[in-house]
Image (tube, helix red, strand yellow):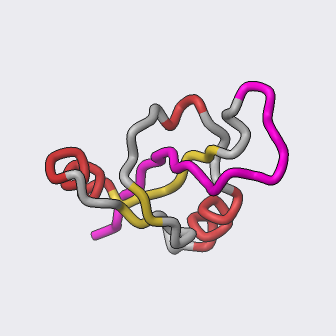
Amino acid sequence: MGTEFQTLSEVLPAPTYQYEDGDEERFAHYVKKDKILDSAISGKPVRALCGKKWVPTRDPERFPLCPICKKIYDQLPK
């Protein structure tokens, strides 16, 4: 019985310099699928594989994958 993950975006703290389009500080993260539905219903924050905790509000397809989440996910047993 494997655990399934899905990506969600998360906004990181503002950088010390200004981005042109504002999306570079955002990443899509791996989160347990059952936590996504719970968050959508309750508004509770989710925790990504990398440890980031936030309430998802954006389309993860628009952002690059978090390199830390990807590294952890790649090391999980298949």
Q: Residue at x 62, y 44 (%)?
A: 26
Tell me: 44 left or right of 41.
Answer: right
The boundaries of the magenta stretch are 1-21
Location of the N terminus (image quadrant): bottom left
Q: Residue at x 81, y 38 (%)?
A: 18
Tell me: 35 left or right of 60.
Answer: left
Q: Residue at x 52, y 50 (%)?
A: 10
Q: Nearer the viewer, residue 33 or 52?
A: 52
> Residue 20's x, y, as percent?
80, 27
Q: Is residue 29 magenta?
A: no
Q: Residue at x 60, y 62 (%)?
A: 69
> Residue 72's x, y, as percent?
61, 70
Q: Is residue 3 magenta?
A: yes
> Residue 71's x, y, as percent?
67, 66
Main SS of the magenta segment?
loop
Q: Vertically, is 26 above or below 13?
A: above
Residue furthest to the top in view is 21
